[in-house]
Image (spheres, rainbow, N blue to C red):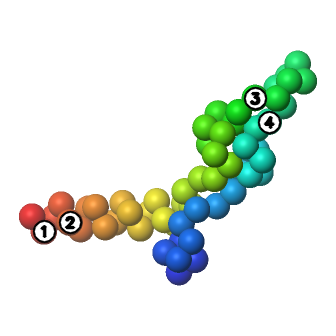
Amino acid sequence: MAVCAVSPWGRCRRCHGRRSHRTTIGTRRDCPRCDGTGIRVRTGRRLLDHIRTEYRDGNQ
């Protein structure tokens, strides 16, 4: 969890951070999973954000 708090971004699992992937016919296109950025939000960071949101909504 500490890694997710310090560095919330990781490489995209589909394109491995290369920003594009090969299609079935052999052409290159932007990765649809990361929208061509090459990065994604880590799962642990997503969990921390969800817990924080639920805590804030419960205290209002």
Q: Viewer-proximal residue, 30 or 60?
A: 30
Residue 42 is situated, as x and y percent measured from the top left of the image, at 57, 61
Tell me which amino acid carries mark 3.
Arg
Q: Tag 2's secondary structure?
A: helix
Q: Viewer-proximal residue, 30 or 13?
A: 30
Q: Residue furthest left?
A: 60
Residue 7 is situated, as x and y percent measured from the top left of the image, at 56, 71
- The image quadrant of residue 53 is bottom left
> Crowding near pointer 1: few (<14 within 10 Å), some, many (20+)?
few
Cα–Cα gap, marks 1 and 3: 45 Å
Q: Tag 1's secondary structure?
A: loop
Q: Viewer-proximal residue, 35 or 48?
A: 35
Q: Tag 4's secondary structure?
A: strand
* Residue 43 as seen in the image, left or right of residue 47: right
Work out whether 60 lies above or below 1: above
Tell me which amino acid carries mark 4.
His
Q: Tag 3's secondary structure?
A: strand
Cα–Cα gap, marks 2 and 4: 39 Å
Residue 19 is situated, as x and y percent measured from the top left of the image, at 73, 43
For marks 1 and 3 on the same chain, the one whose residue lies earlier in the sequence: 3
Q: Nearer the viewer, mark 2 or mark 3?
A: 3
Q: Which residue is mark 3?
A: 29
Q: Which residue is mark 1?
A: 59
* Residue 42 as seen in the image, left or right of residue 49: right
For marks 3 and 4 on the same chain, the one whose residue lies earlier in the sequence: 4
Q: Residue furthest bottom?
A: 2
Do callouts 3 and 4 mark residues in contact (Cβ within 8 Å)? yes
Do callouts 2 and 1 mark residues in contact (Cβ within 8 Å)? yes
Q: Quadrant of the C terminus?
A: bottom left
Cα–Cα gap, marks 2 and 3: 40 Å
Do callouts 2 and 4 mark residues in contact (Cβ within 8 Å)? no
Q: Which residue is mark 2?
A: 56
